Amino acid sequence: MQKVLETNLCIIYYSDSLQKLADATINLLKNKIKQYKIFFGIDLYEKIIVNYFDNIGDFREFIYNIRGEKDSLPKYAKGTYDEGMINAYIESNNQLERIYTASHELFHIFYLKYILKNDYSKRIVWYDEGMAQFMSGEKDKYSDKDCFKDFYLKVKEETKSIPDLNVLEHGESFCNNKYNGYDLSYLCVTYLNYILKPDEFRSLMSDFSQIRNYGNKIIYKMFDYFDNMFNINQ
């Protein structure tokens, strides 16, 4: 880390080449922290810590030093929330394309701390990853119905087999050449947002048994729901 940017809400440690991202993250977190405080029903007094690296080796070494081992980080991983911090490797030449990494990882941090009560064994990966994408703003472009339809059709076409979402963990089982767990998780959470009332959608995050009940057949139900919405012949 070469530079530091600090406000009353967060501290950002970042490589010199990531100045634009650091500045943009300040504005993003100002709004997202306010939104998350309402969604989780919390008060927040500690500052959020962000670590941005422009070198993948430095990023992975940082995470492995925290974890005390060198096996658990998937090859595709570019962001984590170890130690309650937002940690990410960012390519400097397209850094602003990764602006929502901070709000994505921050959702994980709050969910682990305030809903899972730091009991990682309670985490249901598809739900947590789907919600992080849904809440972070990274998929806001899909609020346009045509954009969402194009995304949905692309994901459905690329899904060659239907996984059991409830058993997926990060690694090869989550993303492979048969399906993309991130995309499917986001679509399933979006489907839940359609079929549940706002208070039901919010309260679901702490009802682990109900999340698993949904997860059993949710991909099939999600595909049926959006096929009907877009009048797609099955």
Image: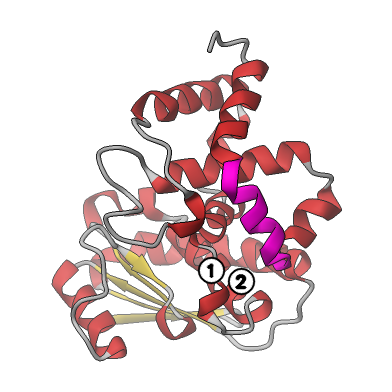
As helix, strand or loop, the secondary structure at mark 1 comes to helix
Q: Which residues are magenta?
A: 206-217
Q: CA distance from mark 1 to mark 2?
A: 5 Å
Q: Name the quadrant of the N terminus.
A: bottom left
Along the horizontal axis of the image, is 158 left or right of 8? left
Q: Main secondary structure of the magenta part?
A: helix
Which of these two is toward me, 25 or 231?
Answer: 231
Name the residue tied to disc 2.
111
At horizontal 38% and vertical 53% (from top left) the residue drawn is: 98
Q: Position of residue 180 (x, y in %)?
A: 37, 42
Q: Are marks 1 and 2 in contact (CB under 8 Å)?
A: yes
Name the residue tied to disc 1.
108
The quadrant in which residue 4 appears is bottom left
As helix, strand or loop, the secondary structure at mark 2 comes to helix
Q: Position of residue 197 (x, y in %)?
A: 84, 45
At horizontal 69% and vertical 43% (from top left) the residue drawn is: 192
Q: Position of residue 226 (x, y in %)?
A: 61, 24
Amino acid type at circle 2 is Tyr
The type of colouring in the image is secondary structure
The correct choice, above or below, for 26 with respect to 212 in the image is below
Q: Is residue 107 magenta?
A: no
The correct choice, above or below, for 26 with respect to 189 in the image is below
